[in-house]
Image (tube, grey):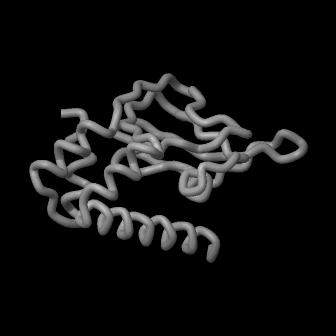
C-alpha cells in the first residue's frame, strides 16, 4: 500500500504492467523522517531519488555566510534529488531535509539504473519525469 501513490503517479504518465509494478515495489524502499531530518548531506555523492508519500522536503545550500538558500521543494506525490549529482554520482553541495515529519520512498542509483533498464516503458516514464523536472526548473528561473 505504501507504493500506491507512486504507482498511481507513474500510471498517469503511462501504463504499467503487473511485473513493472512489482519491480517498483521491490526497488523503492520506505523511509520515515522526523521534522528537520537531513537525508542528503553536503559534500556527499547523491545516490538516492526520493518520492514523497506524505510530508514536505526541501533542497537547499549554504552560502559562505551560512545563509540557507532553498533551491526546490517536494510535497506529496513529487520527486526530489539533486538530479545532476544523482545522474553522475558526484559530490553534492545541496542538503535535502524533511521540513515536516514525512513518509518517503527512495531508490538507490544502482537500483534505479536496473529498474529503467528493465523496461522500455519505465525508461519512457523516466524521460517524461526529466522533461517535467526541467520545465519546472526553467519556470522557476524565469520568475
Which x, y percent locates residue 84?
60, 59
What residue is shown at x 55% (from left), y 73% (from top)?
139
What residue is shown at x 21% (from left), y 62% (from top)?
12
Which x, y percent locates residue 122?
27, 60
Q: Residue furthest left?
A: 18
Which x, y percent locates residue 37?
57, 26
Q: Quarter of the image holding residue 4?
A: top left
Decide which of 100, 61 is in the foreground and name it: 61
The C terminus lies in which quarter of the figure? bottom right
Decide which of 29, 19 is in the foreground and name it: 19
Decide which of 139, 111 is in the foreground and name it: 111
Which x, y percent locates residue 115?
32, 51
The reply, left or right, for residue 10 in relation to residue 32 is left
Q: Which residue lies furthest to the right in this view?
A: 65
Decide which of 125, 113 is in the foreground and name it: 113
The reply, left or right, for residue 26 in relation to residue 133 is left
- The number of numbered discs placed on residues in the rendered structure image is 0
The N terminus lies in which quarter of the figure? top left
Q: In this view, does 87 lie above or below 101?
A: below
Q: In this view, does 25 lie above or below 119?
A: above
What residue is shown at x 11% (from left), y 56% (from top)?
17
Amino acid at each position: 500500500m505504501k507504493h500506491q501513490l507512486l504507482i498511481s503517479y507513474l500510471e498517469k504518465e503511462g501504463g504499467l504492467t503487473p511485473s513493472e509494478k512489482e519491480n517498483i515495489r521491490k526497488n523503492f524502499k520506505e523511509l520515515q523522517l522526523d521534522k528537520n531530518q537531513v537525508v542528503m548531506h553536503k559534500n556527499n555523492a547523491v545516490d538516492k531519488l526520493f518520492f514523497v508519500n506524505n510530508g514536505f522536503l526541501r533542497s537547499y545550500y549554504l552560502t559562505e555566510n551560512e545563509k540557507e538558500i532553498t533551491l526546490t521543494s517536494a510535497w506529496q506525490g513529487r520527486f526530489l534529488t539533486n538530479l545532476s549529482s544523482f545522474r553522475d554520482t558526484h559530490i553534492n553541495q545541496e542538503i535535502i531535509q524533511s521540513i515536516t515529519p514525512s513518509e518517503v520512498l527512495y531508490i538507490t542509483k544502482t537500483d534505479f539504473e536496473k529498474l529503467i533498464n528493465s523496461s522500455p516503458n519505465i525508461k519512457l516514464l523516466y524521460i517524461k519525469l526529466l522533461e517535467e523536472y526541467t520545465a519546472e526548473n526553467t519556470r522557476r528561473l524565469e520568475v
